[in-house]
Image: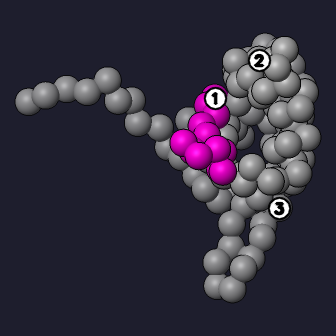
Amino acid sequence: MPTFDFIPKKKYEYIDDGTYIGILDDIYFSPDCRNCWFTIKVDSIENGYFNCMFSNMDIVLNNFCCEYVDDNNCFCSDNVLGKKIEFSVSQRKYGNKSFSKITAIKVISDKE
């Protein structure tokens, strides 16, 4: 039977309103750079990760990324991955669907 180098992680797209602390584990941009996903290892969720999608027009994403640019003023995720962050979540509802939206995010420590 074939094996893969895939290590599954519990991931959540919905968490309760509040302020959380965690490690920014991964940042992924869609090929057309219209959307961005953050994967955050949340301290208060045992072995759990929170996935959040941003539009590239999102104010919170843009303000956060402005702090971590390279010499060409392009966002450089290497400057922020693995850092301890504090983020706030609020629920948004559109029609019958609700989702967790990060409303504030900041780096609070360079170390895990």
Residue corresponding to mark 2 = 79
Question: Within 10 angstroms of label 2, few (less than 14), some, or many (20 or more) residues?
Answer: some
Q: Earlier in the sequence, mark 3 or mark 1?
A: 1
What's the CA distance linking mark 3 and mark 1? 21 Å
Residue corresponding to mark 3 = 90
* Residue 13 included in the magenta stretch of the image: no
Residue corresponding to mark 1 = 25
Q: Nearer the viewer, residue 65 or 92?
A: 65
In the image as oriented, which residue stretches furthest toward the bottom?
95
Q: Tell me which residue sits at (69%, 86%) in the image.
A: 95
Q: Tell me which residue sits at (64%, 85%) in the image.
A: 96
Image quadrant in which you'd find residue 94: bottom right
Image quadrant in which you'd find residue 5: top left
The image shows residue 57 at horizontal and vertical percentages of 80, 54
Badge 2 element = helix
Q: Nearer the viewer, residue 61 or 103?
A: 61
The magenta-colored residue range is 25-36
The image shows residue 17 at horizontal and vertical percentages of 81, 60
Q: Is residue 23 left or right of residue 12?
A: right
Viewer-nearest of labels 3 and 2? Answer: 2
The image shows residue 103 at horizontal and vertical percentages of 87, 53
Type of amino acid under label 1:
Asp
Q: Is residue 1 left or right of residue 75?
A: left
